[in-house]
Image (spheres, rainbow, N blue to C red):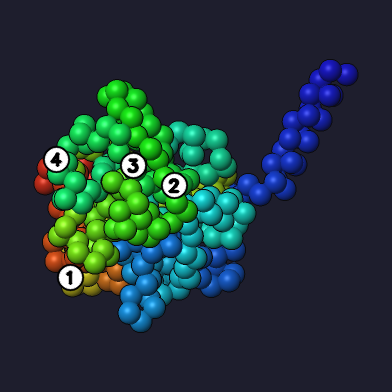
Amino acid sequence: MKMLKSTLAVVTAAVVLGVSGFAQAGATLDAVQKKGFVQCGVSDGLPGFSVPDASGKIVGIDADVCRAVAAAVFGDATKVKFSQLNAKERFTALQSGEIDILSRNTTMTSSRDAGMGLFFPGFITYYDGVGFLANKKLGVKSAKELDGATICIQAGTTTELNVSDYFRANGLKYTPITFDTSDESAKSLESGRCDVLTSDKSQLFAQRSKLASPKDYVVLPETISKEPLGPVVRNGDDEWNKIVRWVGYALLNTEEAGITSKNVIEQAKSTKNPDVARLLGGDGEYGKDLKLPKDWVVKIVSQVGNYGEIFEKNLGKSTPLEIDRGLNALWTNGGIQYAPPVR
């Protein structure tokens, strides 16, 4: 009798999981292919990551990750639609199935990865850390000089806890003012409502670029946390998880191999390098394992670029953000970006 009850409990739990919104294996890819596009959740307007350009097109490194997924699945990077979400909305939109992938400068943490029905595939779009943006008139050169400061923080982010931990650890006091959007936080800094703005450093550079006088503001030198930012999917759908993971790894592997949007077509035809041949579909059936075509990597790079191209176009020195590659350089160039091989 006890064994029967245990069996019934297991079956009941399985049924509950099956109808409670957790994705079943293959469900996301099937749904994406049926509707003909990838629904991607992005920020509500963060330069360099995802923001509408003058024509209304969503541009940025997070948006390009979703275009790369669309290119891999459909062979067409334009088969993607974007949902602009604030920090509070983003996880609910993914959990409910409103979006297929969240690519919104989101930090991978244990509680998010293990306790919210979410899954971080492991590709890190951008290695970041929390910092502080201050008006030069404040005369502050270090975060340790911020005792008693009023600090603007975006609600629903890991930044809130990181700042609390940092100030407590250093015996400092502060007054937080929280806002739902990053734009509200930046406007409050500009108006003088708060002394400094805190967020991931990449976001600080992005927000500074939108201020009326960007050169009046400085990002302080301290980085007070680890913020590995990357795409997020629903837990329980290994097939979709692996596609998103290996799309990210393909972006890194092609940069490392010197494969760019300009030479990928020719490389696919003529390479004598066995690693490159496997990567570009000339040798083996590695796309088949992911339910993708042989030339899935060629489609990604020819239409979206490799990781380095995407980074420089959206965040690099030629952009208003002027961000160095830093940790986001390849491991071969002093950074920590590193991808397993396609083989």
CA gap, disc 3 and disc 1 = 51 Å
Mark positioned earlier in the residue sequence (2 or 4): 4
Tell me the amino acid under the disc marked 2: Thr
**x%, y% of residue 146?**
25, 36
Tell me the amino acid under the disc marked 3: Thr
CA gap, disc 2 and disc 3 = 11 Å
| Mark 2 lies on residue | 178
| Mark 4 lies on residue | 141
Left or right position of 245 against 100: left
Mark positioned earlier in the residue sequence (4 or 3): 4
In contact (CB < 8 Å): disc 4 and disc 1: no
Tell me the amino acid under the disc marked 4: Lys
CA gap, disc 4 and disc 1 = 45 Å
Residue placed furthest toward the right:
1
Q: Which mark is residue 263?
A: 1
**At numbered mark 3, what does the secondary structure look like: helix, strand or loop?**
strand
Visible in this render: residue 5? Answer: yes
**x%, y% of residue 228?**
33, 42
Name the residue rendered at 55%, 65% in the picture: 32
Mark positioned earlier in the residue sequence (4 or 1): 4
**At numbered mark 2, what does the secondary structure look like: helix, strand or loop?**
strand
Camera-nearest residue between 41 and 191? 191
Badge 4: few (under 14), some or many (20 or more) residues near its Cα, within 10 Å? some
Task: Classify the position of the N terminus by image quarter.
Answer: top right
| Mark 3 lies on residue | 150
**x%, y% of residue 14?**
72, 38
